[in-house]
Image: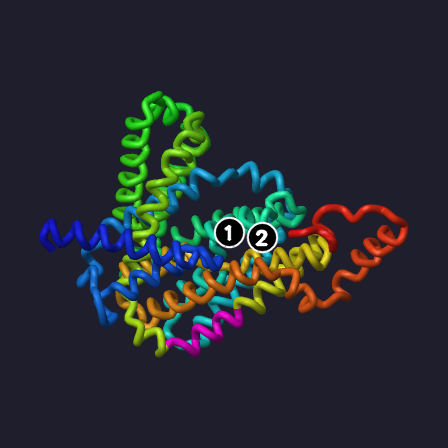
Amino acid sequence: MHLAEALIALGGAFLAAGILARAGARIGLPTIPLFMLAGILFGPNTPGIALVDNPADLKLLGAIGLVFLLFYLGLEFHTDDLVAGGRRLVGVGALYLVLNVGGGFLFGLALGWGWREALVLAGVIGISSSAIVTKVLVDLGRLGNPETRLILGVIVIEDVFLALYLAILTPVLSEAEGMGAAALDVGKAFGFLILLASVARWGTRLVGRLIATKDDELLVVIFTGLAILTAGVAEELGVSDAMGAFMIGLILGATKTAPRIRELVHPLRDAFAAIFFFSFGLSIDPGDLAKVAVPVALAVLLTFVLNGVAGVAAARISDLDRSQASNVVFTILSRGEFALVLAALAASAGGLDARLAPFIAGYVLVMAVLGPLAATRARRFERALPARLFRERYEGVREEEDAGVPTPTGSRGHPG
């Protein structure tokens, strides 16, 4: 592709993604599925204007978008939040992962596409979208609700799981020859993660001095270089660029400069993430989506069931009422960027079932739309949760109401 063609394609990709997402935002749709849809509509597999004939032309920019997404997540991740929740929160998060990730793996095996594909689908179906969940909580004004701490706790535990999951999945998908080679790949991956984790634990002061500068321009250049360099080294060692970006974000997030980095990285994250989602859409043939319509529908139904069971159990363990349980169930429902991270990882590994990528695309498109819509209507779906599971809680609320005691925020009468 010549320079002029490349610039036109890139500018058109930004505009197409932005305009389509702006239109969807007016009816409350999240941006992620719309960025993907823009890639599908203006890609080589759809009749009409094709901004990019070869999805590989945007591969590097898409990879940078993925780097900034995971880098920002690392910046926002705080181990103190996990420790503060105590054993109960860890237990709730573990329960959620066992049900959803385990159910996703069994579903993948039931499809008969292969055990490596099932491992990918376990993460696709089992891990929520931090970006969409956080945005939903902010948009609906639920950050102060009692159940929000539980929701964010589950998201944090998912992030911890994702780090270990990616470290194991990458060498598995690469199909190392023999047990020895596989063990070596896993060892290199964990060794690199342990090195970065050690820096995050004991070396943040030194890293903080390295990046310390009052000049915002220089700070942007430095943290961008660190994020991309670490991602590249991680990819070279078989850890995945996404995991490397997350870990360097975790390290920089513990420095005194972290608040400025979070503010400065926002426009970079938003712009390049849009290209990541757009470039993923470029690789999707709408005709292939029709071929996986039935598995996608079954996966969506399974997600609702598993998420419902896990959410209700988590709410009961945390002593929440039925309204709060409904918020938990339908807020954590969304799937998005992590599923596409896994799709990109699977695509780079090669040798997997060709139906995997269109399945993930279709599943994310559906769940990234249904999730926020269900969250905004959680009160309507509240009746779908068996009242007997929360009977004692409700009887206590009714007794307080009858006695003239004001209903606390977050119970049956709260506006969230």
Mark 1: few, some, or many residues within 10 Å (few <14, many ≥20)? Answer: many
Name the one closer to the observer, 246 or 25: 25
Name the one closer to the observer, 152 or 265: 265
- Report x, y in % for residue 80: 56, 36
Residue, x 15% and y 52% (percent of image)? 6
Up/down of 20 relative to 220, above or below = below
Which label is found at residue 45?
Answer: none
* Quarter where residue 379 is shown: bottom right
Q: Marks 1 and 2, Cα distance to the nearest angstrom? A: 7 Å
* Quarter where residue 394 is shown: bottom right
Our reading of the magenta stretch's main secondary structure is: helix
Looking at the picture, which amino acid does disc 1 mark?
A: Glu
Earlier in the chain: of badge 1 and badge 2, it is 2
- Report x, y in % for residue 167: 38, 51
Which label is found at residue 158?
Answer: 1
Instruction: Report the span colored magenta.
Output: 292-302
Label tally: 2
Residue, x 42% and y 59% (percent of image)? 24
Mark 2: few, some, or many residues within 10 Å (few <14, many ≥20)? Answer: many
Based on the picture, tell me whether residue 250 belongs to the magenta stretch: no
